[in-house]
Each structure stands twice: as structure tokens, then as C-alpha cells.
Image (cartoon, grey):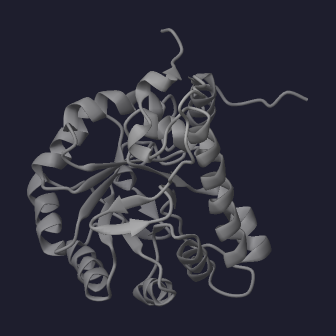
Amino acid sequence: MPEHHTPGDSNAITRAYMDSILIEMRHLGAVLPDTRFSLFGESFSTPVMTAALSHLKGRTGSGMAEMAAGCAAAGAVCWAGMGDEGELEEMLATGARVVKIIKPYEDNDSILVKIRHAARHGALAVGMDMDHAFDGRGQHDVVLGEIMSGKTMQELRGFVQASGLPFIFKGVLSARDAEIALELGAAGIVVSHHHGIMPWAVPPLRVLPEIVRAVKGRLKIFADCGISSGYDVFKALALGADAACAGRVIIGPLQEKGLDGVREEISRMTGELAGAMARTACGTLADISADLLWLPRR
């Protein structure tokens, strides 16, 4: 039976757009590929990362800690979404390098407590999940009983300055927001519509080239939403992302096999990425470029 989607389903639109991008094969002069990746002065085996997931159930215990352990085993960056300080400490204790993303809580003091806790306990970076400030009716969002709110530029600049770590804004889906993130002192942005939080949202990979042109290499760009294979990652990197975040694709393997499931899933995607690199004559991630892609005609 064909799969049916609600009109305006941003996830279906995103998947269809990614699938419409084709890759040009190049074999002459090809070499064994190197997927190593550097971020904020540290080296990793792969640009495949987890998304900023929350409240995961693991195979035997904390799913978030198991996810972090799987990332550490795979040499990948781990992202953490909504969760308490104890959970973040468990994740960091696995040896994983973790980016902590914090919701835009109405209470700014609680945001600052979480930022400072992450910095004190050795997070790689911190950031804010901007797409949860408002709900679909234009009211302040409520997530698991916690009230969110929009933030002024002054408040956002204060969070960036308080962190003492690279600060990342998640939920950027326009060149306009990317430029504002730069003005606020961000070190990175996540190009994302938060798994379809708004209908008819532009696919991240479609707006990505415009964002790349706007920031001119002055901050790191992470692609999110629907990333489920190494070929998706290859396309994101070719369009200018520095790395890509995989979310729902790792949840099943995590719940079935724990940290090994996460490690295997990241390794699978990294292997597919390496395969695409080998068949496009890309020896390193820096060799992956937009001229390898055939984009749909508008």
C-alpha cells in the first residue's frame, strides 16, 4: 500500500526533497576516503552525529547514557536535548563529547543554571532549541509542563556570553536567522524544522546553500531532520554543512541493542558516506562539494 501523508507534512516534504537530489559518480583518480572530522578543536572519526534527542529508553538503563556511550565507541559527537543535570553527567561520564541543547524556558535563571552546569562538567558546547518558544496557535509553548517563551536579542546575547563554551542555535531555517546568530556570537547553528514542528516548512537541505552563502564560513553548520543514511549525510556536506545529525534512525537500534546499536548505526552511516566519497573521488570531507550533486529543477 502507498504511504499517505497529511498535506503540508514537513517531514514528507523534506524526505522527498532529499531523495530528489542525485549524486554524480566520479571514479578516475579516486582514493580511499578519510571521514575524520574536526569540531571546536577536537577530532572525531565521523561527521555523523546524533540529533539532540530526549527521554530515550535504553536496553538496560538510561537510553541517553547508552546513546552517549555508543557515540564514544563510534568516535562521534553526541547531542543531548531536554533532560536534567544528573542525566547529562551520566552521558559525560561515558567519555562522549556532548553538545547540550537547552529549551527556551520562561525562567531565564533556570537556563543559566543549565548552561553553567554543562560548562562546569565538560560539555563540548551548549545551545538553545529556538523552535520550541511558541506553539502552533502563537502562544508560548509548554513542553512536559514547562513553560517556554520567546527571547529578546539581549537575552540571547546574555546566554551566549554566559556559556564560556561554543554556543549553538538550533532551529535555524533561514539566512536571516543565521545572520542574527552570527551577530549574537554563536559558534554554530542547526538547520532544522524540528521534525516538522510547522507544516509546509522548507526542507533544511533546500535552504542550506543560502545559509552557507550568508555565513561565509564564520560558524559551524549542522544539518538536521530526516537524516537516515550516509548518502543523506553526503548530500548535506556537499551543500555546505559541516556535519549532520541523525535522530529517529538510531532510536530502534538503541532500544534493541543499547550502546552497540548506536555504534553500529553510526558506523553503518559512516560506511555509506565513505562509499559515496570513494565513488565520487573525494579523499577527504573537504573534497565533497556542490558540483557533485544534481539538484531538482525549480
Front in this rendered view, residue 122 or 64 = 122
Q: Is residue 191 left or right of residue 266?
A: left
Residue under the point 47% across and 79% down: 96
Residue lying farthest to the top in this orientation: 298
Which residue occupies 51% across, 23% down? Answer: 293
User: Does residue 229 appear anywhere in the picture?
Assistant: no
* Quadrant of the rendering where the N terminus is positioned: top right
Q: Nearer the viewer, residue 275 or 63?
A: 275
Nearer to the camera, 243 or 161: 243
| Among the 4 quarters of the image, the one containing residue 204 | top left
Where 5 sits versus 82, above or below?
A: above
The mark total stands at 0
Residue 44: where, in percent of width, then height?
Answer: 44, 66
The location of residue 149, given as percent across then percent down, is 29, 58
What residue do we see at 31% from left, 81% from top? Answer: 118
* Up-down relation of residue 281 to residue 134 (above or below): above
Extreme residue in the right direction:
1
Q: How far across and down, in percent of the image, does residue 117 sit?
A: 29, 85
Residue at screen point 20% across, 37% down: 216
* Residue 23: % across, % down: 58, 26
Q: Is residue 238 visible?
A: yes
Residue 20 in the image: above or below residue 83: above
Image: 294 above or below 35 = above
Residue 185 vs residue 118: left or right?
left
